[in-house]
Amino acid sequence: MTPLMKKEDGEWVRLDWEEALSEATDELARIRDEYGADSTMWMGSAKISNEEAYMFRKLAAFYGTNNVDHQARICHSTTVGGLANTWGFGAMTQSCNDVTNADANLIIGHNPAESHPVMMRYIQEARENDGDVIVAEPRFSKTSAHADTTTQFRPGTDIAFINGLLYHIVYNLEAHDEEFLESRVYRWEDAKENIADYDLETVEDITWVPVETLKEIAETLAEADVSTVEWSMGATQHTVGTQNIRSFAILNLALGDTGTPGGGNNPVRGHDNVQGATDACILSHHLPAYYGLDKGAWDHWTNVWDQTPSTSGSISYEEMRDRFESQELMEKNGLTVSRWFEGALDDDERKGDLYQPEQVRALVVWGHSLNSLSELKRVKKAMENVEIVIGVDPFPGLHSSLPEREDGIILLPAATNHESRGTVTATNRSVQWRYQAVTPRHNSKRDFELLQEFADRLGFGEHFDYDEIEDVLDEMNLGMRSIGAIGWRPERIKAHMENSHVFSVDDLQAEVTDDHELAGEYFGLPWPCWHDDHPGTPILYRDEVHPAEGGLDFRARWGTEGPDGETLLRDAYEPDWWDGEIEGVPQYPNYATELPDPETPAAPTTSIEYALSDEHSVYDAAQALDDVDESEFEAFDNEQPDPPTGRGRARAAAWNLPDEVPKHREPVETPRPDLIDEYPNYEAQEDFYRLDLDNRGKQEEFRTLSEDLPLIVTSGRQVEHMGGGYETRNTEGTANRSPMMYAEIHPRVANEHALETGDWVWVRTEPGSMLVQAYVTERVEEEEVFLPYHWGGIFEGESYTDRYPDGTEPLVIGDSANIGMSIGYDPVTNMQATKTGLCQLEPASDDEIPELPEEQQAYQRQHGYTR
Ligand SMILES: Nc1nc2c(c(=O)[nH]1)N[C@H]1C(S)=C(S)[C@@H](COP(=O)(O)OP(=O)(O)OC[C@H]3O[C@@H](n4cnc5c(=O)[nH]c(N)nc54)[C@H](O)[C@@H]3O)O[C@H]1N2
Ligand SMILES: Nc1nc2c(c(=O)[nH]1)N[C@H]1C(S)=C(S)[C@@H](COP(=O)(O)OP(=O)(O)OC[C@H]3O[C@@H](n4cnc5c(=O)[nH]c(N)nc54)[C@H](O)[C@@H]3O)O[C@H]1N2
Ligand SMILES: [Mo]
C-alpha cells in the first residue's frame, strides 16, 4: 500500500515512519494519562504469527488494560466455551486428515466447499472410503451438493435438531453407549432427561425437518462404527452458540465416539492463524494459554516476564498491578471485539451502563476488519466519537472510510505474512513455521517490528527487546504450560517443515526408522506437546495411547467432585499399553505454573515429568513440590503414567453455564413468536464484559417484528471473497470473479417482487437497510435471504469511495451485511448473532442505485449481471 497517511482537515497527508509512530504512540500515551488505560480498545488479529499475537496480548498488559480482543470472539469463541466446558480443552479434537476415517460425518453449519476447500478434499475422501456425509443447515450449499444426505432447517434451531436426533438414538433405538457414558461422563442422566422433551414431532415443528429425515439421520449416526460432528460459523454465531456446541459434544459422547480416530469434533477454524491467536489469547478474559485474569494468572505471567532470558526487563506482580488503575480492573474481563463500540458511545447513546471508569477514547485496529462487526451503524458512530483511530494493516480498510471524520485517523502499513516470519497454528493444533518469502515491500513494516516500536515508545521496550521471533517462541514455551505449548522448539518446528514428506497423511506420524530424530513425532507437534521430547497429541482424549506417546484423557479441570458430590474423575480401566489398572486422577499440582530453568524453557518440570512417567503417582508429585498441600493428594497414590491434566470425566451437565444442558431458545428476532413463551432467550445480564446485555428484553420488544419483516436473514461466505474483503475486493482476480454484493433470494420470492439476478433491492432490517443486487437461487428456502458479509464501500446505499486515500479505493464495493445483523449476543462469550435476523425486501428505484467503480461495472457486464 502507499506510505503512511493521516487525516488533517479532511485531507490525507503522508508522514514518514518516525512521525507516524510518534503521533500514534503519543496519542496513546496522552489518552492513558488523561482518561486511564481502559479508555482504549485494542483490536488484534488472527492474521499475525503466534509470536506477534502473544506480543500483542503482552503489550496490552504492559499498557495497563484488558480491553484487547480479536476475531476469535466473533468466530469460534462459542466453540471454545462449549468444548472447554464439556471435556476440558476448547479445540478441535481431531486432525483434518482424520476426517477420512469417519464412518459418518454430520456437517452442521459449515460450507467447506466454499470456506475450506482443503478440508473438503478429506470429506470427499471419507466418502470414497464408504463414509456417510450428512449436511444439515438452512441452505442447500455447495457442500450439500457433495453429501449423501442433506436437510435444511430453520436458522437458530440446531439444538432442537440435535436433541431430536438424540431422542431417536436414546429412546427409540437405544443405541447410545452406556458403558462409555457410565465410566467417562459426568451427569449423563441430566442430559438424557432433557432430551426427553424433544420428541420428533416437537422437533419437526421447531426446525422444519420432517420426522422421517430426523430418523434417517439418527440411524445413520447410530449405525456408523465411528462418527464425527463438524461445524464452523453456522453453529457458533448465535445467542445459543455455546449451547449449540455443547449439544454436538454431547451427541458425540452419547455415541461413545470421542477420543478415537474418525470420531470427536471438528470445529474448523477460519483465519490462517486464528487457532494460534486464540491460544496466545488476544482475548479480553485471558492471559496467554487461557490462564484467566485472576491473581494466580497474573502471578504466573509476571513470573515468566520477570525470568525470561529473551528480554532484558524485570517485573513483579506489584509493579504490574500498578500499571493498571486497580487490581479490580486488572482482574476484570475487558470489552470485546463484538461490543466494544457501546463503550465508546456517550452515556445517552449506550445500551445500559458501562462498567469501567471512563468511556473508550482511542481505537487501535491491528489487522482486523470493521464491517465484520454486527450493529455496524453503532460501530460507525463509535468510530466517529473516539478521539483517535489507529489502523495497522496492509490495506486502508474500513477504518479509513467508515467513520465520517475530519481528522484523527492514522494508517500504519503493516507487511503481510509473506513478508514476515514466525509460527502459525493450524485448526488441528499443530504448528508450522511460516518462512519469509520477500522482504517488506512498499515501505511497510513487519508487525513484529511495529509491536516493538509501540512498546518502546510507550515506555516498556525492555520487555520486548527480543532479537528475533525465535526468542519470543522461547518465552512462550516457558509460559504457555496449561495447554502444553511447551515442546514447540523453533528447531523442531523447522525440522518438521523441512522433512514434511516423511509424515503420514493418515495419522500425521513420521514414517522413519526408530533411530531417526523424528521417530514417534506427529507433524507440527499438535498441542499438548508437553516437553522438548514429546511427540505431540494428534487426537485429543485418546486413553488407548500412553500419554508420553500422545495419549490424553478428559481434563480434570473442575476438581475431583461436582457441587452435587458426584465424582469428576473417570472410572479405572485396563488399557493394552499398561499392565494393570489406570485410575481416574486429578490434574498434577502446579503443572501449569511450575517453571523449568528459563534457559531451557521446554525441559520437563517435576510435575510434568512425574505425570508422564510410569513410576510416579500424583501423590509423589505433590510430595516432591514445595508449596503443595500433600494431604489433598494422598488418595491418588497409584504409580501410573498420566497426562499432566489428570484423568477426569466429560461433563454432560455444566453447572457454571446459563443452561446446564442444551435447551432450544428462540432467536432474539424470531419468525415464530408463538414459541417465545416456551423457549425464551436469555435473561438480562449486568456488567457482562463491562456492559449490560438483555437478549430477553430485546426479544420481547421484537415480538411482533415478523409481521413487518417476514423473511429470515442470514449471512456467511462466498468462496471468492475473504473476511471484510479488503484483500479480495482489491485484487483483480477475485474482484472480477465476484463483482457484486448480493442477496440470495428464492425464485418464488423473487417473482413476488419482480426481481431478477442483478436487479437492485433494499434488504430492510430492524437495525438498518442494505441496498444490494438480487441473486435468484434455490440455494435458499422461500423463508430465507442470505447475504455474504465481505462487502463495504457503500453504506445504506451511499457510496463512500471518496473517503479512501486517493488511489486506494477498492476495485469493487457493496453495502455491508452487518448493517442489518441481529443484536443478540451469547451470554457466555459475547459472540454476535449474525445468522438469525429478520428482513423484508423492497425493489429499489432507479434514482437510488449507487454509482459503482468503472472496473466493477465492466466486471458486472462480463457476467451479464446488469440489465
Ligand atoms: N473463501 C473464504 N473462505 C473462508 C473465509 C472467507 O471469508 N472466505 N473465512 C474463514 C473464516 S474466518 C471462517 S470462521 C470460516 C467459516 O466457514 P463457514 O462456517 O463454512 O462459513 P459461513 O458461510 O459463514 O457459514 C456456513 C453455513 O452456515 C449456514 N447457516 C446459517 N444459519 C445457520 C444456522 O442457524 N445453523 C446452522 N447449522 N447453519 C447455519 C449458512 O447457510 C452457511 O452455508 O471460513 C473461513 N474460510
Ligand atoms: N454477518 C457476518 N459477520 C461476520 C461473520 C459472518 O459469518 N457473518 N463472520 C465472522 C468471522 S468468523 C470472522 S473471523 C470475522 C472476520 O473478520 P475480519 O478478520 O475482521 O476480516 P478480515 O477482512 O479477514 O480482516 C483481517 C484484516 O487483517 C489484514 N491483514 C492481513 N494480513 C495482515 C498482517 O500480516 N498484518 C496485519 N497487521 N494485518 C493483516 C487484512 O488486510 C484485513 O484488513 O468476521 C465476522 N463477521
Ligand atoms: Mo472466522
Image (cartoon, grey):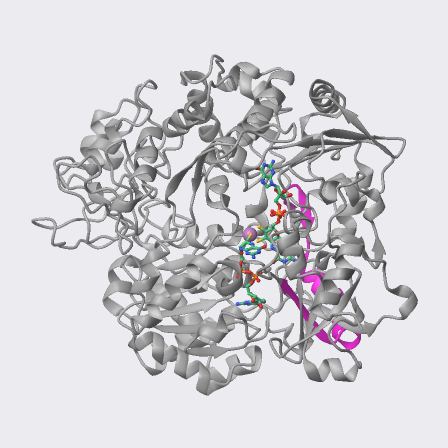
Total number of numbered labels? 0
- Residue 462 colored in magenta in the image: no
Magenta span: 687-715
Q: Which of 612 and 666 is in front in this view?
A: 612
The image quadrant of residue 856 is bottom right
Q: Along the horizontal axis of the image, is 168 left or right of 636?
A: right
723 lies above or below 698: above
Q: Nearer the viewer, residue 42 or 772?
A: 772
In this view, the residue farthest toward the right is: 847
457 lies above or below 269: above
Q: Is residue 413 visible?
A: yes
Q: Along the horizontal axis of the image, is 413 left or right of 543?
A: right
* Residue located 65% across and 66% down the image: 714
In this view, the residue farthest toward the left is: 579
Q: Quadrant of the C terminus?
A: bottom right
The image quadrant of residue 13 is top right
Q: Is residue 656 visible?
A: no
> Residue 49: where, in percent of width, then height?
49, 36
* Residue located 47% across and 60% down the image: 117
Report the image quarter containing ligand 1. Answer: bottom right
- Residue 701 colored in magenta in the image: yes
Q: Along the horizontal axis of the image, is 429 left or right of 708?
A: left
> Residue 694: where, in percent of width, then height?
68, 56
The image quadrant of residue 521 is top left
